[in-house]
Amino acid sequence: MTNHQIIVPLDVSDLESAIALVDQLPQVTFWKVGLELFTSTGPTIVEILKSRQKRIFLDLKFHDIPNTVAGACRAAASYGVDLLTIHATNGKDALKAAVEAVQIGAEKAGTKPPKLIAITLLTSISTRQLAFDLKIPLELPEFALQMALLAQESGLDGAVCSPQEVGQLRESCGNDFLLVCPGVRPTWAEKGDQKRSLSPSQAILAGADYLVIGRPITAAAEPELAWNQIVEEINTVS
Ligand SMILES: O=C(O)c1cc(=O)[nH]c(=O)n1[C@@H]1O[C@H](COP(=O)(O)O)[C@@H](O)[C@H]1O
Protein backbone atom coordinates (compact mmCIF):
# COMPACT_ATOMS: atom_id res chain seq x y z
CA MET A 1 0.00 0.00 0.00
CA THR A 2 1.25 3.43 -0.90
CA ASN A 3 -0.27 6.88 -0.53
CA HIS A 4 -1.44 6.53 -4.18
CA GLN A 5 -3.96 4.01 -2.91
CA ILE A 6 -5.71 6.53 -0.68
CA ILE A 7 -8.63 8.12 -2.49
CA VAL A 8 -9.97 11.39 -1.10
CA PRO A 9 -13.58 12.33 -1.90
CA LEU A 10 -14.35 15.84 -3.11
CA ASP A 11 -17.59 15.92 -1.13
CA VAL A 12 -18.18 19.65 -1.63
CA SER A 13 -20.97 21.58 -3.31
CA ASP A 14 -19.23 23.64 -5.99
CA LEU A 15 -16.24 23.94 -8.28
CA GLU A 16 -14.47 26.63 -6.26
CA SER A 17 -14.50 24.55 -3.07
CA ALA A 18 -13.34 21.48 -4.99
CA ILE A 19 -10.41 23.31 -6.57
CA ALA A 20 -9.49 24.84 -3.20
CA LEU A 21 -9.28 21.33 -1.68
CA VAL A 22 -7.21 19.98 -4.58
CA ASP A 23 -4.84 22.96 -4.21
CA GLN A 24 -4.65 22.49 -0.46
CA LEU A 25 -3.62 18.83 -0.77
CA PRO A 26 -1.22 18.57 -3.74
CA GLN A 27 0.10 15.24 -2.43
CA VAL A 28 -3.27 13.55 -3.13
CA THR A 29 -3.06 11.79 -6.50
CA PHE A 30 -6.47 10.06 -6.54
CA TRP A 31 -9.68 12.07 -6.05
CA LYS A 32 -13.28 10.92 -5.90
CA VAL A 33 -16.05 12.89 -7.58
CA GLY A 34 -19.40 11.88 -6.14
CA LEU A 35 -23.06 12.66 -6.47
CA GLU A 36 -23.04 16.10 -4.87
CA LEU A 37 -20.18 17.62 -6.85
CA PHE A 38 -21.00 15.95 -10.18
CA THR A 39 -24.63 17.05 -9.93
CA SER A 40 -23.41 20.56 -9.24
CA THR A 41 -20.60 20.91 -11.80
CA GLY A 42 -21.14 18.19 -14.39
CA PRO A 43 -18.02 16.93 -16.20
CA THR A 44 -16.11 20.21 -15.72
CA ILE A 45 -14.55 18.93 -12.49
CA VAL A 46 -13.41 15.76 -14.28
CA GLU A 47 -11.70 17.85 -16.97
CA ILE A 48 -9.97 19.98 -14.33
CA LEU A 49 -8.67 16.96 -12.44
CA LYS A 50 -7.47 15.35 -15.66
CA SER A 51 -5.63 18.52 -16.67
CA ARG A 52 -3.77 18.21 -13.35
CA GLN A 53 -2.87 14.55 -14.04
CA LYS A 54 -4.99 13.29 -11.14
CA ARG A 55 -6.60 9.85 -11.07
CA ILE A 56 -10.39 9.98 -10.81
CA PHE A 57 -12.96 7.78 -9.11
CA LEU A 58 -16.34 8.80 -10.59
CA ASP A 59 -18.70 7.60 -7.89
CA LEU A 60 -22.17 7.95 -9.38
CA LYS A 61 -23.57 4.70 -7.94
CA PHE A 62 -25.93 3.98 -10.82
CA HIS A 63 -29.09 2.08 -9.89
CA ASP A 64 -31.76 1.59 -12.56
CA ILE A 65 -33.09 -0.81 -15.18
CA PRO A 66 -30.52 -2.40 -17.53
CA ASN A 67 -31.17 -0.12 -20.52
CA THR A 68 -30.89 3.07 -18.45
CA VAL A 69 -27.85 1.88 -16.51
CA ALA A 70 -26.11 0.90 -19.75
CA GLY A 71 -26.74 4.35 -21.23
CA ALA A 72 -25.38 6.07 -18.13
CA CYS A 73 -22.30 3.83 -18.11
CA ARG A 74 -21.62 4.51 -21.80
CA ALA A 75 -21.70 8.24 -21.12
CA ALA A 76 -19.59 8.03 -17.95
CA ALA A 77 -16.98 5.84 -19.67
CA SER A 78 -16.39 8.55 -22.26
CA TYR A 79 -14.77 10.83 -19.61
CA GLY A 80 -11.66 8.66 -19.28
CA VAL A 81 -11.96 8.18 -15.51
CA ASP A 82 -10.24 5.38 -13.59
CA LEU A 83 -13.08 3.96 -11.45
CA LEU A 84 -16.87 4.00 -11.83
CA THR A 85 -19.54 2.68 -9.43
CA ILE A 86 -22.86 0.91 -9.85
CA HIS A 87 -24.98 -0.86 -7.21
CA ALA A 88 -24.70 -4.67 -7.19
CA THR A 89 -28.42 -4.75 -6.34
CA ASN A 90 -29.17 -3.64 -9.92
CA GLY A 91 -29.11 -7.39 -10.60
CA LYS A 92 -27.21 -9.50 -13.09
CA ASP A 93 -28.82 -8.21 -16.31
CA ALA A 94 -28.02 -4.58 -15.53
CA LEU A 95 -24.51 -5.44 -14.30
CA LYS A 96 -23.72 -7.33 -17.50
CA ALA A 97 -25.17 -4.51 -19.61
CA ALA A 98 -23.01 -2.04 -17.68
CA VAL A 99 -19.84 -4.08 -18.30
CA GLU A 100 -20.52 -4.04 -22.03
CA ALA A 101 -21.52 -0.37 -22.00
CA VAL A 102 -18.29 0.92 -20.42
CA GLN A 103 -16.27 -0.81 -23.15
CA ILE A 104 -18.44 0.69 -25.88
CA GLY A 105 -18.47 4.18 -24.33
CA ALA A 106 -14.71 4.26 -23.84
CA GLU A 107 -13.97 2.87 -27.29
CA LYS A 108 -16.22 5.43 -28.94
CA ALA A 109 -14.48 8.24 -27.05
CA GLY A 110 -11.04 6.77 -27.78
CA THR A 111 -10.21 6.42 -24.11
CA LYS A 112 -9.40 3.65 -21.62
CA PRO A 113 -12.50 2.10 -19.98
CA PRO A 114 -12.86 2.71 -16.25
CA LYS A 115 -12.71 -0.18 -13.81
CA LEU A 116 -16.36 -0.86 -13.05
CA ILE A 117 -16.94 -1.66 -9.38
CA ALA A 118 -20.11 -2.60 -7.51
CA ILE A 119 -21.41 -1.28 -4.22
CA THR A 120 -22.09 -4.36 -2.09
CA LEU A 121 -23.80 -2.71 0.87
CA LEU A 122 -23.39 0.95 1.81
CA THR A 123 -21.07 1.39 4.77
CA SER A 124 -23.68 3.54 6.50
CA ILE A 125 -25.99 0.53 6.91
CA SER A 126 -25.79 -1.40 10.21
CA THR A 127 -26.64 -5.03 10.85
CA ARG A 128 -29.83 -3.88 12.53
CA GLN A 129 -30.87 -1.64 9.62
CA LEU A 130 -30.24 -4.44 7.12
CA ALA A 131 -32.54 -6.76 9.04
CA PHE A 132 -35.23 -4.41 10.32
CA ASP A 133 -35.43 -1.63 7.71
CA LEU A 134 -34.37 -3.39 4.53
CA LYS A 135 -35.80 -6.79 5.61
CA ILE A 136 -32.85 -8.69 4.17
CA PRO A 137 -32.92 -12.15 5.77
CA LEU A 138 -29.16 -12.74 5.54
CA GLU A 139 -26.32 -12.01 7.92
CA LEU A 140 -24.66 -8.75 6.84
CA PRO A 141 -21.27 -10.26 5.90
CA GLU A 142 -23.03 -12.96 3.87
CA PHE A 143 -25.12 -10.37 2.01
CA ALA A 144 -22.03 -8.28 1.19
CA LEU A 145 -20.23 -11.42 -0.02
CA GLN A 146 -23.14 -12.51 -2.21
CA MET A 147 -23.27 -9.03 -3.81
CA ALA A 148 -19.53 -9.15 -4.51
CA LEU A 149 -19.83 -12.62 -6.05
CA LEU A 150 -22.75 -11.45 -8.20
CA ALA A 151 -20.61 -8.54 -9.44
CA GLN A 152 -17.70 -10.88 -10.15
CA GLU A 153 -19.89 -13.39 -12.01
CA SER A 154 -21.32 -10.52 -14.06
CA GLY A 155 -17.84 -9.50 -15.22
CA LEU A 156 -17.20 -6.41 -13.07
CA ASP A 157 -13.67 -5.48 -12.04
CA GLY A 158 -14.28 -5.19 -8.33
CA ALA A 159 -16.45 -4.10 -5.45
CA VAL A 160 -16.85 -1.46 -2.78
CA CYS A 161 -17.22 -2.85 0.72
CA SER A 162 -16.65 -1.85 4.32
CA PRO A 163 -13.27 -2.72 5.86
CA GLN A 164 -15.09 -5.16 8.13
CA GLU A 165 -16.00 -7.39 5.17
CA VAL A 166 -12.93 -6.92 2.99
CA GLY A 167 -11.03 -9.91 4.40
CA GLN A 168 -13.79 -12.35 3.58
CA LEU A 169 -14.35 -10.84 0.13
CA ARG A 170 -10.63 -11.00 -0.65
CA GLU A 171 -10.55 -14.67 0.32
CA SER A 172 -13.59 -15.55 -1.80
CA CYS A 173 -13.04 -13.29 -4.82
CA GLY A 174 -9.25 -13.67 -5.18
CA ASN A 175 -6.43 -11.22 -5.71
CA ASP A 176 -7.48 -10.00 -9.17
CA PHE A 177 -10.75 -8.56 -7.89
CA LEU A 178 -10.39 -4.89 -6.93
CA LEU A 179 -11.62 -4.11 -3.40
CA VAL A 180 -12.21 -0.49 -2.46
CA CYS A 181 -13.02 0.42 1.15
CA PRO A 182 -14.77 3.57 2.32
CA GLY A 183 -15.86 3.83 5.96
CA VAL A 184 -12.23 3.97 7.06
CA ARG A 185 -11.57 5.82 10.31
CA PRO A 186 -8.27 6.45 12.07
CA THR A 187 -8.71 5.94 15.83
CA TRP A 188 -8.54 9.73 16.37
CA ALA A 189 -11.39 10.53 13.91
CA GLU A 190 -15.16 10.85 14.35
CA LYS A 191 -17.19 7.98 12.88
CA GLY A 192 -20.02 10.25 11.68
CA ASP A 193 -22.56 8.26 9.65
CA GLN A 194 -20.18 5.32 9.01
CA LYS A 195 -21.40 2.17 10.78
CA ARG A 196 -18.86 -0.54 9.91
CA SER A 197 -15.50 1.18 10.09
CA LEU A 198 -11.96 0.03 10.83
CA SER A 199 -8.69 1.96 10.91
CA PRO A 200 -6.57 2.49 7.76
CA SER A 201 -3.95 -0.06 8.87
CA GLN A 202 -6.61 -2.64 9.74
CA ALA A 203 -8.31 -2.17 6.34
CA ILE A 204 -5.01 -2.68 4.50
CA LEU A 205 -4.04 -5.73 6.52
CA ALA A 206 -7.47 -7.19 5.74
CA GLY A 207 -6.83 -6.90 1.99
CA ALA A 208 -8.13 -3.55 0.65
CA ASP A 209 -6.62 -2.29 -2.62
CA TYR A 210 -7.81 1.28 -2.09
CA LEU A 211 -9.08 3.24 0.89
CA VAL A 212 -11.59 6.08 0.49
CA ILE A 213 -11.01 8.53 3.35
CA GLY A 214 -12.91 11.79 3.42
CA ARG A 215 -13.87 13.79 6.49
CA PRO A 216 -10.99 12.58 8.71
CA ILE A 217 -8.81 14.50 6.21
CA THR A 218 -11.02 17.12 4.58
CA ALA A 219 -12.83 18.23 7.76
CA ALA A 220 -9.68 18.20 9.90
CA ALA A 221 -8.42 21.49 11.32
CA GLU A 222 -5.19 20.75 9.43
CA PRO A 223 -5.96 18.48 6.44
CA GLU A 224 -2.32 18.09 5.46
CA LEU A 225 -1.38 16.94 8.96
CA ALA A 226 -4.27 14.45 8.97
CA TRP A 227 -3.13 13.11 5.57
CA ASN A 228 0.44 12.72 6.84
CA GLN A 229 -0.73 10.87 9.95
CA ILE A 230 -2.74 8.43 7.81
CA VAL A 231 0.17 7.86 5.40
CA GLU A 232 2.44 7.26 8.38
CA GLU A 233 -0.04 4.76 9.83
CA ILE A 234 -0.32 2.76 6.60
CA ASN A 235 3.46 2.79 6.15
CA THR A 236 3.79 0.92 9.43
CA VAL A 237 1.93 -2.08 7.95
CA SER A 238 3.08 -2.10 4.32
O1 LIG B 1 -18.88 4.47 -3.16
C1 LIG B 1 -18.36 5.03 -2.19
O2 LIG B 1 -17.30 5.64 -2.30
C2 LIG B 1 -18.99 4.84 -0.88
C3 LIG B 1 -19.65 3.65 -0.66
C4 LIG B 1 -20.07 3.31 0.63
O3 LIG B 1 -20.60 2.22 0.88
N1 LIG B 1 -19.84 4.19 1.64
C5 LIG B 1 -19.23 5.40 1.43
O4 LIG B 1 -19.04 6.14 2.43
N2 LIG B 1 -18.86 5.76 0.16
C6 LIG B 1 -18.29 7.10 -0.09
O5 LIG B 1 -17.05 7.23 0.60
C7 LIG B 1 -16.90 8.54 1.13
C8 LIG B 1 -16.70 8.42 2.61
O6 LIG B 1 -16.44 9.69 3.13
P1 LIG B 1 -16.09 9.89 4.68
O7 LIG B 1 -17.16 9.19 5.48
O8 LIG B 1 -16.10 11.37 4.84
O9 LIG B 1 -14.73 9.26 4.90
C9 LIG B 1 -18.14 9.33 0.73
O10 LIG B 1 -17.83 10.11 -0.41
C10 LIG B 1 -19.17 8.28 0.36
O11 LIG B 1 -20.00 8.69 -0.69
Image: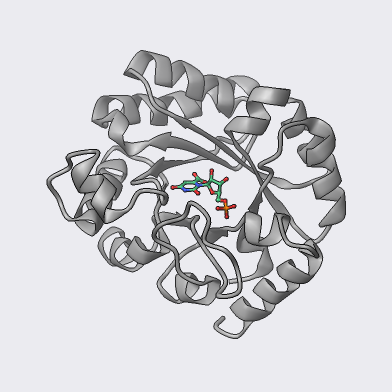
Q: Where is residue 121 in the image (x, y as percent from the top left)?
A: 34, 46
Horizontal side of residue 211 vs 194, given as left or right:
right
Question: For residue 166, which quarter of the picture?
Answer: bottom left
Q: Quadrant of the C terminus?
A: bottom right
Question: For residue 200, which quarter of the picture?
Answer: bottom right
Residue drawn at point x = 54 percent, y = 60 percent:
210
- 237 vs 213: above or below: below
Residue drawn at point x = 71 percent, y = 39 percent:
12
Residue 51 in view here: no
Q: Where is residue 30 in the image (x, y as percent from the top left)?
A: 68, 52
Question: For residue 76, which quarter of the picture?
Answer: top right
Horizontal side of residue 135 vs 116, given as left or right:
left
Q: Where is residue 165 in the image (x, y as percent from the top left)?
A: 33, 62
Front one among 161 and 99: 161
Q: In which quarter of the image is the N terminus?
A: bottom right
User: How many labels, in total?
Assistant: 0
